[in-house]
């Protein structure tokens, strides 16, 4: 009779080894974020500008050092923000952070968060006297406006109620129609087409979704850095050159010096473009 361990006794140890191998095969949170950033063609500076997370914190998180975040709540918020910026699902990374750092964070005490509320002055009750005075002034103004309108509309009422004027004799008064003050769509669309030819004009429109964009002039000075929501448009102009970085080029329509740029940008692709005077194509 054998006194050795049975196969059933050895299975727990094998399961533990398999689980350890899986843990080793899974990349760390910082490594996963770094690989996704590099695959997207973005630098740490690009990520910091797009998310407003300081560069030293981005470097620390990619090195799996979360002490610079200031606590679990902020660390989770930074992980979620960085993951979305590099097109990663933040849920698995947050679950992995919970496994490695003790599960969900403890609730933050309310006193430090709302300390500023304590120094606010107490709200006073409604000032009924001021409200009554304002109501009386409004009524008096409305009555005066109505009487003034009645005097002005007297002549127009007589013309409307009288007989139809004949073509002979004195001409009947005509009512002038007001011209619309809002610019027509053609006028707004032609604004970029009328751009000076001695400069380069680039219009960026988020037609199919939100996209992060960065624009610089020929000296490298930052003209814009942030997200462009769907339906929003930005126009940049420089004497010789405009440099662009598009975080999601597939959602963008470009117009350069009055001409639409035909492109085959894919959704989620990162594009770095340069445009110059008189050049409707990418430089």
Image (spheres, grey):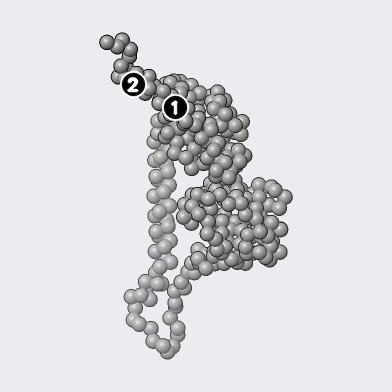
Q: Tell me what residue is drawn at x 55 percent, y 23 percent.
A: 67
The residue positioned 69% from the left and 47% from the top of the image is: 221
Q: Position of residue 96 (x, y in %)?
A: 44, 28
- The quarter holding residue 98 reads top left
**Mark 2 to mark 1 CA distance (whole Å):** 15 Å
Dot 1 alpha-carbon crowd within 10 angstroms: few under 14, some 14 to 19, many 20 or more:
few
**Mark 2 touches mark 1? (CB < 8 Å):** no
Image position of 224 (left or right of 107): right
The residue indicated by pointer 1 is 21
Q: Element type at marker 2? A: helix
Question: What is the number of the mark on residue 213?
Answer: none
In the rendered image, the residue lying farthest to the front is 1
Observer-nearest residue: 253 or 250? 250
Label 2 sits on residue: 11
Residue 182 seen in this snapshot: yes
Does residue 175 sit above or below 228 in this rendering? below
Q: Which quadrant holds the C terminus?
A: bottom right
Percent across and percent down for residue 106 are 42, 21
């Amino acid at each position: 009779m054998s006194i050795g361990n049975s196969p059933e006794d050895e299975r727990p140890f094998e399961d533990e080894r398999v689980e350890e191998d899986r843990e080793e095969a899974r990349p760390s949170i910082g490594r996963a974020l770094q690989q996704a950033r590099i695959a997207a063609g973005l630098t740490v500076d690009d990520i910091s500008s797009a998310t407003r997370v300081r560069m030293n914190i981005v470097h620390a998180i990619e090195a799996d050092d979360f002490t610079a975040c200031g606590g679990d709540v902020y660390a989770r918020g930074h992980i979620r923000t960085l993951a979305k910026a590099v097109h990663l699902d933040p849920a698995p990374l947050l679950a992995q952070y919970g496994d490695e750092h003790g599960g969900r964070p403890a609730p933050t005490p309310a006193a430090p968060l709302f300390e500023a509320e304590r120094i606010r002055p107490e709200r006073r009750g409604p000032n009924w006297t001021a409200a009554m005075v304002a109501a009386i002034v409004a009524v008096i103004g409305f009555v005066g406006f109505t009487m003034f309108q009645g005097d002005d509309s007297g002549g127009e009422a007589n013309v409307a109620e009288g007989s139809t004027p004949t073509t002979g004799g004195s001409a009947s008064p005509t009512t002038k129609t007001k011209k619309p003050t809002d610019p027509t769509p053609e006028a707004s669309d032609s604004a970029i087409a009328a751009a000076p030819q001695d400069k380069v004009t680039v219009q960026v429109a988020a037609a199919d979704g939100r996209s992060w964009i960065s624009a610089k002039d020929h000296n490298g000075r930052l003209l814009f850095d942030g997200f462009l929501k769907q339906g929003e448009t930005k126009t940049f102009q420089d004497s010789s050159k405009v440099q662009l970085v598009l975080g999601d080029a597939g959602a963008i329509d470009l117009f350069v010096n009055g001409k639409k740029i035909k492109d085959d940008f894919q959704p989620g692709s990162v594009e770095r473009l340069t445009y110059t005077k008189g050049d409707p194509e990418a430089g």
